[in-house]
Amino acid sequence: MAKSVRVVLSEQGKRVVEGRREWLLVTGFPGFGYVGTIAVRYMVKKLRAPKVGNVFTKYMPDFIAVEDYGIVTPFELFAHGGSGILFLLNNVIPHTAERQTFVEAVADWFSSVGGRRAILIGGLNQKFRVNEGEELSWLCLNECGWTLPETPLPRGLYVVGPLALLSMALETRGIPTLVVLPYTDPSRYDPRAASVAVERVGELLGLSIDVGELLEQSKIVEEAEEMLKEAVREAESKVRMHM
């Protein structure tokens, strides 16, 4: 019987992945602020990491799109061989019925190819910001080896969704994992919060990644939101004038 979740590498991808004995996983999901997916997609683009495979699932969303590297699929794997980083780009959230199966399959596959450490990226609701001025919180599992200057995730706050499930799967397999959680507005697409994650991960891994494009995207999003708010205010004002 076929497995409901499978990691499938291209022939070139197999050669790349098998060419190293140790790998670091960087991934996230389109949760609060879409932060994890924006950050991973941006790092893949800026590092020009080639696509090496896909994750296929039983309840896989039926879409593709076109990018510079070829077709875009729901769950994509990229490898930056020079730095030993595997990127899992989740363009959608796995179907609820198979989220646990998804993270278990990813964690098992990562372990099998020499996975040694992981960095997971997600958004944290900004209303839970502990100290004014801090842009993120974080969580270290299995003595991950990284320490950030910001306040670690306080007791009583929850990480939820597939990011939480993947954290559990990696933790139970003994894989040192850092969870990076920039503060964000859960209701909006947030490139600025993603830029915080990209900068911090780049610093930790010794990678120089310019986040200028993300900040420009954030400016465009903010301007569009302000224009929408202004249009709403004008519409409400006209309604009151005719009451």
Image (tube, rainbow, N blue to C red):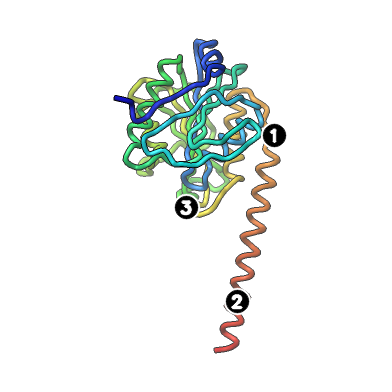
In the displayed structure, does residue 204 sit left or right of residue 25?
Answer: right
Identify the residue at horizontal 57%, vertical 30% (top origin).
201
Q: Where in the figure is residue 150, as x and y percent of width and height?
A: 52, 37
Identify residue for label 3. Answer: 127
- Report the number of discs: 3
Labels 2, 1: front one: 2
Question: Could you say which is closer to the camera, residue 216 or residue 50?
Answer: 50
Query: Which badge, 1 or 3, comes first in the chain's sequence?
Result: 3
Q: Secondary structure at mark 1?
A: loop
Distance in Å between CA atoms under marks 2 and 3: 30 Å
Identify residue for label 2. Answer: 235
Q: Where in the figure is residue 180, as x and y percent of width and height?
A: 50, 35
Say what amino acid the circle numbered 1 marks: Asp
Q: Secondary structure at mark 3?
A: helix
Query: Which badge, 2 or 1, comes first in the chain's sequence?
Result: 1
Say what amino acid the circle numbered 3 marks: Lys
Identify the residue at horizontal 62%, vertical 65% (top origin).
228
Q: What is the quadrant of the N terminus in the image? A: top left
In the displayed structure, does residue 215 sit left or right of residue 239?
Answer: right
Residue 180 seen from this side? no
Label 3 crowd bin: few (<14), some (14–19), many (20+), radius 10 Å = few
Tell me, for residue 196, which label it has, or none. none
